[in-house]
Image (tube, rainbow, N blue to C red):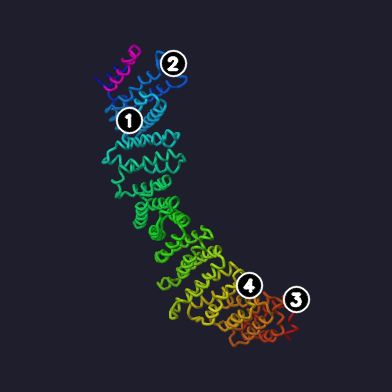
Amino acid sequence: RNPVAGATELLASFVTAYEHIPAHRKQGLFVALINTLGPDEFLAEVQLQTLARLLDLISDIFKPKPGLSATLLGVGEDLAEKKPETTALQQLTVFPSLLSSRKLRKEITVLTERDDMDSSKIRDLYAILLRDVLALAETVKNQKALHECCGNALANLLNLLSIGEFIKSVENLLDHTEIDLRRKVLRALEVRVDQEGVADVASRTALLAFLPQLTAAIRDTDDIKYKHTAVACIDKIAEKYGKKDVEAPDTRLRVMALLCLASLVDVLQDGILPIVNIAISQAILYIEQSVEEEKAANELHNAGYAFITALAQHLPYMISAKHLDNIFLASNKSAEANLDNEADDERLNCLRFLARKVEAKTLLASLERNWIPATETGFDATDEWVDIFGVVVESHTKSVVTKNVTALSTILLNSLDLRRREHAKEKLGNTASQRVSKIEASINEVALKMIYKLNDAAFRPIFTHIVEWSTQLPKQDVAGRALRRFSVYGFLQMFFESLKSIVTNYATYIVDDAVEIIKTCDFKLPEQKELWRRVLSTLARCFEHDQDDFWQAPAHFSKAAPVLTAQFLNASSVDLSAELIPAVVELASAADSQEHQKELNSTILRHLRSEQASVRLAAVKCQQELAEKLGEEWLSALPEMLPYISELQDDDDEVVERETHRWIVKIEGVLGESLDSMLQ
């Protein structure tokens, strides 16, 4: 006969006779029937549904006002004769025997492997059963027999599915239920892990793939008990499979391991100390490997930095100088690897954490050692080095900065030598020069932040050392000397421009060097020509902000004025309007003395009779700017100027003649009267 038809008749007979079967025989007969029919073609899903409903019924027994259980089981009618505990135990004993059925386990395995709607229903039912068994066990924890029976049911339930299917089934419970239940589910998982075989590849893969969810559980919850349970789970997985997979080539497993470690640092903190040295070395190695591969493994790269960030946040004292050196070396390669924005952000976030958290002395020493490797790796790595240097300076107090002033000054000197070193490697083309200029601007900004945290007594020795150091190269290295000084004067220009009158007297230390550079410039050499421009711009900023009559002092004025006015003779070699003329105008304004202004005016007027039209033109333009800037104060010397102006109105050079007329207009604008009658 057709077995389906036969089973249908058998089930119909059971249902018909159910009410006539003595209560103590009902469950045994039902179990025998199920085992006889088997779940292969019947009842696999129905059995789980039946068990779930039975659990509901048993749980109902222990409610203050039993509902369905009072009707079906007679609970609550005569408590003296029918104890709820006895009735519940009678019903619950069916669970272990049904759940231990090999046939049921086999059929459920087949169903879940299909990964279709049926398998989804099985997983949902399984999650409900697990939830309800755990809840019932909590309810009856003070009743030994019932609690033991729940334990047996749970043990059989845990083994009903493969570990992979178990994890799939409980994922929703871990995401959407109350914290106590989630904790119990993780404890159940821990028990299940203990039962798995080490050699079972499928179990190992499923559990390792589940690690990110466990780490997320640690990271996302504030419940410390739940964190500890998740850590215990990870510990159990690591204990069982860690050694097996320590050399695993699977990048995904490495990512999971690093993320787990990052979460463990968050939770265990000092408790993770025994493995820190091994783990951080491995993380650095993985970062290096991730950027060396043809296709960068961004996830592995980011996981490595996530772990180091967690250490920097919670255990910065465990990151040694050697670790820092290796992190910076790996980060140099990463910075130049053209990774995506997320990877760049992860790296920078990690390095900035290190800069803030690691002891300043250790961090600065490592930065100093990493300067050359960073510059040799590339400009992106150098940019990031400067960024981290800035974070160190910005994040530490004035006292910490002062205490580490020697290291800071050495780092600053090294960074101010970037342009010369790039030129020495023959890498300073136009594009490279622009990048170096941007990096130097960033370095100068960091230097300024450092200066703000130092008092005069601490910074003045650094300043004098920078000026002296700028000349400490062999004289035969003409280009090298010019390039180093170019960088230093870039810093000095920013220094005088930003701190203004507060630091004007620091010009004492640079005036001799500046005068020498201006006097000895060879305009045929591009490096010297650019240096000449920068020195003049630096002096102009210094003159501009003088509020203490520093440049009015004869000792200072007499050093600068003759050299500046002599530069008009170089008009044929270089444009004087951008740097020299503004410098002369600012010096005349700073000198603020009739005697000094007369000296300047007399020299410039002599240039108006030069045989070179370019010199005459530059002198005329300078006089225009002086008249505009100083007004009537400067034009008090107009009687001396008039003969020169009169001559220049008929100059052989049309441009000089045109600019002279502009000069006249400016004078008339200041005086408010025409010069016609004076010039006749």
Query: Residue 191 lies in magenta, yes or no?
Result: no
Examine the rendered structure and indicate whether residue 287 appears above or below residue 243.
Answer: below
Q: Secondary structure at mark 3?
A: loop
Q: Disc 4 designates what residue? A: 546
Q: Distance between the Cα atoms at labels 4 and 3?
A: 30 Å
Q: Is residue 52 left or right of residue 526?
A: left
Q: Distance between the Cα atoms at labels 1 and 3?
A: 106 Å
Q: Are marks 1 and 2 in contact (CB under 8 Å)?
A: no
Horizontal and vertical percent position of residue 649: 67, 84
Which stretch did the figure color magenta?
13-35
Query: Residue 19 lies in magenta, yes or no?
Result: yes
Horizontal and vertical percent position of residue 37: 27, 22
Tell me the amino acid under the disc marked 2: Gly
Q: Distance between the Cα atoms at labels 1 and 2?
A: 31 Å
Q: Distance between the Cα atoms at labels 2 and 3?
A: 115 Å
Q: Distance between the Cα atoms at labels 1 and 4?
A: 87 Å
Tell me the amino acid under the disc marked 3: Gly
